[in-house]
Image (tube, grey):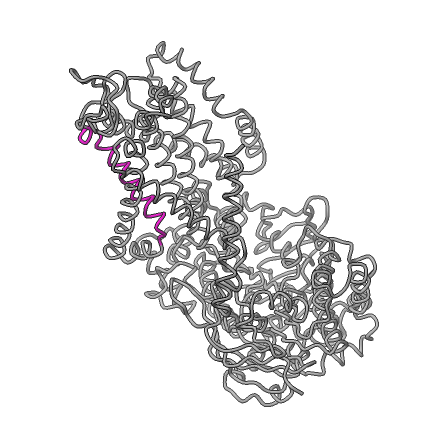
Amino acid sequence: MSGFVTVVLFFVGMAVFAWAFRSVARALKPDEPVFRDMPYATAFGYIFGLVAIMGAIWLYALSRDADPLVANKYFFAGKAMEAFVLFTIAAWLFRVVGRSIGTNGSRKLFRQMPLTASFGILMIILYSIAAIFAGVIAPYGQDEIIQGVAANIVPGGNPAIGGNPEFPLGTDQLGRDLLSRLIYGAQNTVGIAFVTTLLAFFLGGSLGFLAAVLGGWFDQIMSRAVDVLMAIPSLIFALLLMTIAAVWAPRLGIPLTLFMVVIIAVIDSTRVYRLARAVGYNIVVMDYIEAAKLRGEGMGYLIFKEILPNATAPLLAEFGLRFCFVFLTIASLSFLGVGIQPPLADWGTMVRDLAQFINFAAFAPQVAAAPLLAAGAIALLTVAVNFVVDWMLHRSSGLKS
Amino acid sequence: MSNLLTINDIYIEGRSDEVWSPIINGVNLSLKRGEVLGLIGESGAGKSTLGLAAMGYTRDGCRISSGSVNFDGIDLVSASADVKRGLLGKRIAYVAQSAAASFNPAHKIIDQHTEAPTQHGVMVRAESSEDAMQLYERLRLPNPHEIGFRYPHQVSGGQLQRAMTAMAMACRPDLIIFDEPTTALDVTTQIEVLAAIRKIVEDFDTAAIYITHDLAVVAQMADRVKVLLRGDEIETADTRQMLANPQEDYTKSLWAVRSFERPAKPAVHTGATPVVSVRGVTAAYGKVDVLSDVSFDMHAGRTVAVVGESGSGKSTAARCITGLLAPRQGHVEFDGAQLPASYKQRDKMQLRQAQMIYQMADTALNPRKTIAEIIGRPVQFYMGLTGRAKTKRVDELLTQIELEPSQYRDRLPSELSGGQKQRVGIARALAAEPKFIICDEVTSALDQLVAEGILRLLADLQDTLGLTYMFITHDLATVKSIADEVVVMKDGRVVEQGPKAEMFQPPHHPYTDLLLSSVPEMDPDWLTNLLEERGMENIGDAAVGKM
């Protein structure tokens, strides 16, 4: 109860403070339009943001506390904040560099880029490097059980609390290096997700455009089939099909991963189909399509030369989002045990394997952080991709007007 | 008497590509109570921006960088949002170009009408809806007590525009800004709206700013006219004085546009085979007949203008000729041979011979292709030219439409002006080397000066290449300047057809007469005289009454 009262009082305090802030500002500068026309919600937003920043600084101060027991508790919070600031600066530098080198077109692109987008792009580049050069970067193998080293080394690399500087992120129950597994996880999870998304787009995109151009019975049959597939909850459907595939795969001698790629691609292609058809329909009614039809152009020319170039912006944006969903589906399936199979390192599997450590959160936050590393890697990539997608959507809608 | 509205040396800027570029450069404007000021200029002249600035408002991405807007002692540029909220809708109202797009389609007209008066506390709801019906009656809307309870889509365009004028009047404002209120309407409907606006402005002694690009319209409406060009004021004068004696060269050139006329061509040989012949075509969308038993011929080297209001079936006739819509009865002949009904059954040769130029050049050109690709495709597709031969042909075509090849070849349509886009549309049609071209309202989206350039180009091309045009339009001035023969359509039927000279001489079919007399003339007394002639009482139903 007292916790609830505290929260309410806290918000009331902020509300009063916001009102006072606006009134004082108006009294001091009566002619300033910023304060004069400021809605109350905006004033509250400013105060809320201020409180949030103060909270973050306080948390960071705790992580640098002289008492190692206190400092260790907030170790990861502090590191995350440091990394956040560092990456923001890196993103800003990245944009500055992009603005000053390259062709005129790319410079213009960087000039109009918001910081979030450059942060996202930088993140995606880092992930791609990790995925492509995993074998070179990772200090150990992904399934290598390091001899002579105890399992369950705590992350942080501080020997005082049970860490080991050689394994900055610690080791898992079997004594495998978590950092290496995290890097290999990028290769497996992101690589497979990328291939799956490409396949989904090829399927859904071409069928969607075809339905838009042909219309009539083809459109009806395809669209109703897609409706049926979409009506089934996708994760449960995937789980069901994967269970069946798990029986077939060894019998046919085809890796289960291939089945997974196809199954997820087909399920996700329904969403792509919907989008491609809707976008396609808007383009098909344009006069230039009519002109091309009257010229006697074939279906291939219509789809690939007339429609596709005009649909790239929404499709690219959807590609980013779809990639996140596919990637989360793979992680979920792996977490449930039917996705990417051990000993391959995969972020979903890593979360599942290390999940029991979350129980230690109350007294040893660093230990509980181990499963969150993989989850954090997933979350960060999702956020990064969404930043970039938001920017692309904004650009494509801005071009239209 | 002091001015109601004074705009002093106003500068407005718009933001594009991270830089502020000027839209309005130091324009002054003053308006007395009950006075109507006409603002004219081409698109991009800053008419609408200035009109909105008179309300202290700028569109997103624009700002008033200096100057003042003084409305009845209040400076709208520095006024707070609260002060403006109290004025807009109550003392200053705005009538937009497209009433269909400005009404909320989800609410009844009268609910939208009563919103402003009740919000501003001028009237209670019941009072306001009673008042709305009186306004509807005054504006001669049919069934004034019932029409307000319809949704916007259940009312015709002209009626909706009048309802919007009534809505602007709801709080009895001191100032109304009309932003091209009749541009989207047919000539016959335009009259009703013009008469309604003029009446209500006079009745309530309201000041108004009337924005338009049509000189003849402004001559009917405004007491004074201000001419704008690219954000600069060219000249201001009383309407009669400006019409009689324009001072500046630009104003004179605007006046001169309507003078383009081609010499008449000799009569067609009797018995000559027409290039395209429409024979008894009846066509339908779904179950409703849009065309019934339409027949007309188009002879080589001639321009046939097909005239009529929107919904008269002009464009449907074109769709039957191109084969996009298969007729239910009748057929189309090309050089004496019957064409297959659907374009899908026609061969490449038949498709090549008949080309089309569209009204909206924006949607007719693929925005992701360069000009060379757009024009080059039919060259390659029909003529089989590739590589250097194709480039050469594209350059030839660009020269033909008076665009410098080296400069325009690699541009995208978005980097061209409206008139240039339309020229590229013409070049794409020419690239197929056709005999026959359908021009579907090709000039109606363009400014008068630009439109005249397009008409001249089409006329020159016809002379050099011996083309046959089917010219679909609702603008009789265009017909006068370019047509050899005229086909008048109404409700899917051909009402009258014949050579241009005959069509513009009485006696007319009553519908042709209505169309002809509805075209606004430069004479400021034209509307007054016309209304007297037709009888003020039935102005709302003038179109119907005359039939």
- For the point 51% across and 48% down, which residue is it? A13
The residue nearer to you, when weighing A73 against A383, is A73
The image quarter in which residue B287 lies: top right
The N terminus of chain B is located in which quarter? Answer: bottom right
For residue B110, say whether it is visible.
Answer: yes
For residue B436, say whether it is visible.
Answer: no
- For the point 53% across and 67% down, which residue is it? B58
Q: Main secondary structure of the magenta part?
A: helix
Whole-percent x and y of residue B339? 58, 49
Is A269 placed left or right of B266 in the picture? Answer: left
The residue nearer to you, when weighing A211 against A15, is A15
- The total of numbered circles placed on residues is 0
Whole-percent x and y of residue A199? 39, 31
Chain part drawn in magenta: A113-138
Does the magenta portion include A114?
yes
The image quarter in which residue A332 lies: top left
Whole-percent x and y of residue B436? 53, 60
- For the point 34% across and 45% down, which residue is it? A57
Does the magenta portion include A394?
no
The residue nearer to you, when weighing B403 against B223, is B223
Furthest toward the top, the residue is A251
The image quarter in which residue B522 lies: bottom right
Furthest toward the left, the residue is A148
Q: Decide: is B366 above or below A25.
A: above
Q: Decide: is B243 above or below B80.
A: below
